[in-house]
């Protein structure tokens, strides 16, 4: 990418979508995340980087309450999406997860057809009036997942029969089918080859037009390529957060500098 393109890409004045304050996460007695405050912008890709075990996935899971599904996990603090407290008792986590989609490290299609993988969310959330409507939603999601052309002639074949990279794009299509506002991606390319990785990265760049995207990655090249904002975590702390350009060229904290120059991690 040229320097000028990089600069343009990194100018982001979009409103805050996700605001976290004073977030702590414990697994039993051990604390995995401490005192995290962060504002994540809409229509922006935010990368979470940091050494293994620093709490990236734990914090990511706070944003759609996936930690609710882990018995030992306890989350305190305040996380708001569009000003609404997502941990409020009145919030239904299932509804929340339709609005805040997630893509995991390992592609995890359901043991169903390609069509049914994508139609599943829209069906349970009642997003389609009839079959034609649902067909349209499925096609649009597969197009947004950049996989339509590869699967349009075999929509009723099993999703698990696709290649790894295709499965991951199917999972992205499944995540966008419920019209989420936020997309969380935990190392979405780690099981993919360079070609599939490039396709998913291109897709992430497109998704930014409509969503707030948060991506966990171990690849600093990937963070630099796809994100406009970067957050560096270390031992459960959010050490530094800022424009991706600044984090990679002018880090303020010595821990960030050590990590990006390969001295820790
Ligand atoms: N289900 C769990 N039960 C107990 N401890 C956990 C659980 N999940 C994570 N932890 C602990 O919380 C800390 C943060 O883990 P987390 O998975 O969030 O790190 P990470 O930054 O995503 O690491 P990686 O880059 O290896 O994926 C680690 O010490 C980990 O052992
Ligand atoms: Mg992780």
Image: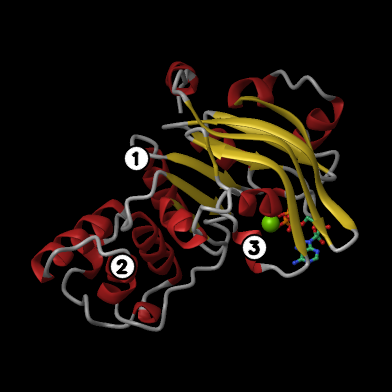
Where's residue 13, x and y in %? 46, 18
Residue nearest the observer in this picture, 37 or 228: 37
Say few, some or many: other residues with alpha carbon within 10 Å of mark 1 (under 14 / 14 to 19 / 20 or more). Answer: some
In this rendering, the answer to whether 199 lies above or below 207 is below
Label number found at residue 26: none
The correct choice, above or below, for 232 with respect to 169 in the image is above
Residue corresponding to mark 1: 206
Describe the element under mark 1 as helix, strand or loop: helix
Q: CA distance from mark 2 to mark 3?
A: 24 Å
Secondary structure type for disc 3: helix
User: Residue at 74% across / 43% down in the picture?
Assistant: 50
Which coloring applies here? secondary structure
Left or right: 28, with 8 as reference point = right
Extreme residue toward the left, this view: 132
Q: Report if the CB atoms under discs 2 and 3 are less than 8 Å apart.
A: no
- Measure the alpha-carbon separation of dots 1 and 2: 19 Å
- Find numbered disc 2 in the image and state the secondary structure of the residue it sits on: helix
Q: Nearer the viewer, mark 2 or mark 3?
A: 3
Of residues 252 and 58, the one nearer the viewer is: 58
| Label 2 crowd bin: few (<14), some (14–19), many (20+), radius 10 Å | many
Q: Earlier in the sequence, mark 1 or mark 3?
A: 3
Query: Where does label 2 land, which residue?
Result: 118
Residue 68 marker: 3
Q: Quadrant of residue 121?
A: bottom left
Q: Nearer the viewer, mark 1 or mark 2?
A: 2
The answer to whether 157 is drawn above or below residue 172 in the figure is: below
Residue at 60 percent across and 60 percent down: it is 66
Residue at 43% x, 58% y is: 95
Q: Is residue 198 left or right of residue 158?
A: right
| Image quadrant, ligand 1 | bottom right
Residue drawn 51% across the image and 33% down it: 83
First-in-chain label (1 vs 2): 2
């Amino acid at each position: 990418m040229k320097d000028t393109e990089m600069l343009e890409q990194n100018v982001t004045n979009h409103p805050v979508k996700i605001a976290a304050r004073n977030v702590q996460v414990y697994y039993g007695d051990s604390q995995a995340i401490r005192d995290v405050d962060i504002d994540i912008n809409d229509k922006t890709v935010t990368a979470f980087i940091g050494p293994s075990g620093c709490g990236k996935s734990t914090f990511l899971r706070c944003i759609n309450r996936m930690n609710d599904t882990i018995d030992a996990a306890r989350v305190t603090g305040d996380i708001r999406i569009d000003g609404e407290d997502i941990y409020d008792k009145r919030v239904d986590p299932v509804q929340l997860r339709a609005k805040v989609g997630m893509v995991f490290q390992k592609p995890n299609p359901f043991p169903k057809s390609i069509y049914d993988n994508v139609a599943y969310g829209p069906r349970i959330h009642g997003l389609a009036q009839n079959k034609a409507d649902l067909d349209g939603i499925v096609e649009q999601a597969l197009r947004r997942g950049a996989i339509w052309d590869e699967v349009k002639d075999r929509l009723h074949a099993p999703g698990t029969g696709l290649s790894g990279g295709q499965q991951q794009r199917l999972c992205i299509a499944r995540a966008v089918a419920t019209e989420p506002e936020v997309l969380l991606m935990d190392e979405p390319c780690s099981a993919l080859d360079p070609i599939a990785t490039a396709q998913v990265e291109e897709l992430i760049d497109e998704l930014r037009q409509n969503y707030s995207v948060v991506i966990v990655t171990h690849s600093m090249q990937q963070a630099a390529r796809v994100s406009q904002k970067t957050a560096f975590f270390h031992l459960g702390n959010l050490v530094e957060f800022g424009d991706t350009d600044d984090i990679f060229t002018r880090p303020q904290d010595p821990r960030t500098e050590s990590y990006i120059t390969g001295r820790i991690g």
